[in-house]
Each structure stands twice: as structure tokens, then as C-alpha cells.
Amino acid sequence: MTDMSKLVLPCDNGPYRDGKGTLFEGGSRVAACANWPGHIKPGTVDGLMHAVDLYPTFAALAGASTAKCKPLDGVNVWDTIAEGKPSPRTEVIYNVEPFRAAVRQGDWKCIWRSLIPTSVDLYNLAEDPFEKNNVAAAHPDKVAAMQGRLDALGKEATKPLALMWMVGTAMKHGKPIMGSEEGKGTALIGGGGRSITDEGFGEVEAEAEHH
């Protein structure tokens, strides 16, 4: 067994932009260490790798077949780890949510925020690893292609359970609101019940309960 007691790995994701919970590199890129004397060459590896690659990599090392598994997101990256060869991974999905998503393809990374007002970032991580220069306006075709990929992934993905729970809970307490005519603001469909907004609706019910 190797003595790892004096090994220090950075865990703050610096010097990359931002941190946990964000779609920037500081929210996902971390250092890792692999040690197997006689099997892994000493050195630094900078190829694309994801946590989901560990399972197919370890399975291959153990001689186990993944043929009967459900479709795997991971790939075998053993040659990259052990020999420093180019990674077979060409894409990283950072997250796909109804309100934001990000994908990296090669050196290009696209961050798409779909909530109004929408925004999109495009970075070339080989030239700009700290994501300081958004070049989306200069590469509209690249942005459109990567947004198309994210949209396709969103259609494949299962809806987030937390979001579904929040929407379901909110709908139990009131009916959807819709805009009223003549600039009178929004109104509850059918009237009554609590509103799922914080625009003052639901006061009638609160007053009724008070009296």
C-alpha cells in the first residue's frame, strides 16, 4: 500500500471561475489522483474524463462485461489514465435542467440559461480556461448546434423530481393565474383559492379565515 498521508489535493476548484452549484469550471473541474505502481506511468493527464467513466474503466480492468447493462454514459479511460493517451471522451454534460444547461464538446463549452431573460455563453476552454471571454456572438453557428444538442438531451431526460414536487405542491394551493383585460392585472381562473404567486392574490381567503 502506498503512503498517501502526505498527499495534498486542492478541493476549492481554484483558479477556475466560480464554485459549486454553478455551470462554470469552478463548479465541476476537480483534481484527481490515481496510483498503481507498475501500471500507471507517473505524470500529469489533462484529457477529458468524467466520474461516470470510472465504472466502465474498472469493469474493463476486472474483465467484466457491460454488454447487458443499460446504456452507459461512461467510457473506458484506462489508456488515458495509465499511458497519458488522448481521452476517448469528446463531450461532457455539465447539467440539463428546465432553466439551465451546459455542454462541452472538445474545447468548446456552451452554457444556456433559458429563463427570461435568456442568455448564452460560449467559451473556448483551450484558449480561455477561466471563462473570462464569452465569444457566443462571434460563433452563432456553434452556439446553435450546441443548443440543439442540449435541447435533445432535455427531451431525453427525466423531469427533475424536486421541480415536479414543487409544481405539484403549488398547484394544490391554488389555480393558475392568467392576465386579465383592460390592464387590471392578473386574476385567478375561476376565483377563490390561494394564488401560487406573490402578487397579492389569496388575500380574500386570508381575510375570510380571519373573520
Image (spheres, helix red, strand yellow):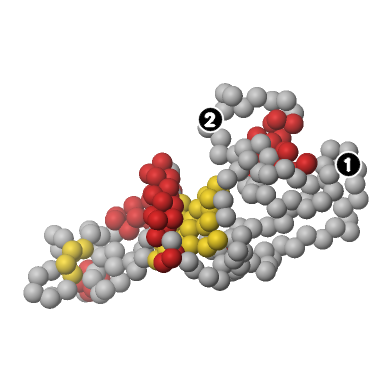
Quote the CA–CA distance across marks 1 and 2. 33 Å
Residue annotated with mark 1: 37
> Residue 21, relative to residue 155: is it above or below?
below
Residue drawn 49% across the image and 68% down it: 134
Residue drawn 40% across the image and 56% down it: 141
Q: Quadrant of the C terminus?
A: bottom left
Residue annotated with mark 2: 70
Name the foreground residue: 65 vs 75.
Answer: 75
Residue drawn 23% across the image and 59% down it: 176
Q: In this orientation, does residue 209 appear?
A: no
Q: Is residue 169 left or right of residue 186?
A: right
* Percent of width and height locating residue 88: 63, 40
Q: In this orientation, does residue 32 appear?
A: yes
- Specify few, some or many for label 1: CA neighbours under 10 Å numbering under 14, 14-19, or 20 or more: few
Q: Quadrant of the N terminus?
A: top right
Name the foreground residue: 139 vs 177.
Answer: 139
